[in-house]
Amino acid sequence: MKEVTACPVSPAPPESQGNMKEVGPQALAPRLATLLPSCTGAAEFAPRRRSSSHSEKAEDWAAISDMPNQDVRDGKIIHALIADALFRFQGVETEPLDMFWTSSKDQEVIDKCVERVKSVYLAEQARGAHPVLLSEHRVDCLAVCGLPDICVGYCDCAIIADDSIRVYEFKNGHGPVHWEETIGQCKLYALGLIPEYGTRPQFRLTVIKPGRNYERCVTLTSDELIQWGEETMVPLVRGALQGKRTYRPGPHCNICPGRPLCRAWVTQMIAALDSRFGSEATVSLQQSPRLNEREVAELLRMTQEIESCQQPLEEWAVGHIQHGGTIPGYRLGHNPGNLRFHDEAAVRQILEAHGLWAQAQKLRTPHEMQKAIGNEAYQKLVAKYAYRTPGKDVLRRDDTIGGSAQ
Ligand code: SF4
């Protein structure tokens, strides 16, 4: 893939110039670190806040219902419900997540992931390998390679047995798997388990994407794993955090958090559009004035890529204005939040006492509940438990400003 030279959007922060201990806020989440072999520029877009697990407290989930990106929201919910099911399988009581309603397709994803892990765990138990099942487990991925507290994340699931460590990465949706980056993520989680559980002769790393009927596994020895960490990841992470960044747009950009703001990516996209369509503004006699099927497909792919950037770009612009910045021709508006129940357990009890639980099936949003049990029962029994989430700021055109955005 063509390499694009671009200045970083912002220079590497002074605290990242050499002293790794001082780069806490610039630490790289495993998901982002796995992009480095393809593009070290991705480090530019590391979030300032450390990533959290999918097992947030119930009160944090209220905000999730306001998340604009449905894929991200569904992904969080699916992962939380998988973790919840695995905790319950082990007899661990967790905060009730009954308020999450998932589509039957998402529930299928959850069931397949949970069943797969359970069957392996039970098989390990049956052969006397003393398995320990971990879910949403915090790992310091490069600590074993001498780089602690830089690449910290949460492993979706792992099974630690006497003679092997299995790591599972669950993917929802139907999109491409991005195997290289995903297996890199699994390797980082596996490395992160070593300080706590030691090495094993075998590390089995599995990616499961039920939406595509996809399951792929690789097996490594601990030596191979540690060698990959020390020889591939540590130099890349050190270099990237010290500001050595090269921008290489490619298919991996699709999973890079920097894409909408990345100058290299935008430059390449514009250049591709220009070279393919721009120079031919005048149609020659040999050409049809209409695009052919292949050209339509090409243009569709490009416009879809550009379109997929709109939401992240808007989110960035909202945050920028909230923090005192300006985007010419745009202002903030506010969308009201969604209705949620603040005490799902109480709502469930009331519905059960009135014989309405089967009708409600599962605690859903208050709006869906109202439809399921009828307005009268809803108002009489459970409406008082509903509250509105804070809502969110959104980007609006500011037509009051002369020369507003085109
Ligand atoms: S969007 Fe692509 S080119 Fe830009 S930093 Fe991310 S991976 Fe690199």
Image: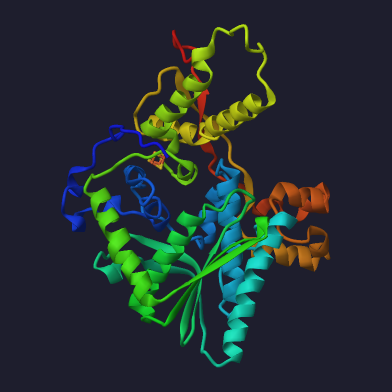
Ligand 1, seen in the image, is in the quarter at: top left
Residue 74, compared with residue 316, is above or below; it is below
Residue 149 in sight in this render: no
Q: Measured from the top left, where is residue 341 in percent x and y?
A: 64, 54
Look at 38% across and 76% down and name the residue there.
Answer: 222
Residue displayed at 62% across by 43% down: 338
User: In the displayed structure, would residue 241 be above or below residue 85?
Assistant: above
- 90 and 121: which is toward the camera: 121
- Residue ID at (47%, 81%): 164
Q: Nearer the viewer, residue 29 or 302?
A: 302
Q: Quadrant of residue 361?
A: bottom right
The way the protein has been coloured in the rendering is rainbow
**Picture layout, residue 321 above or below residue 123:** above
Please state if 94 lies on the left or on the right of 374 as rendered.
Answer: left
Q: Position of residue 337 (x, y in %)?
A: 58, 41
Locate residue 169, reporting x and y percent: 53, 64
From the viewer's side, name the closer residue of 230 and 312: 230
Where residue 351 appears, as percent x and y from the top left, is 77, 63
Residue drawn at x 37%, y 33% as measured from the top left:
264
Residue furthest to the bottom: 128
Viewer can see residue 212:
yes
> Left or right: 357 with respect to 60?
right
| Quadrant for the N terminus in the image | top left
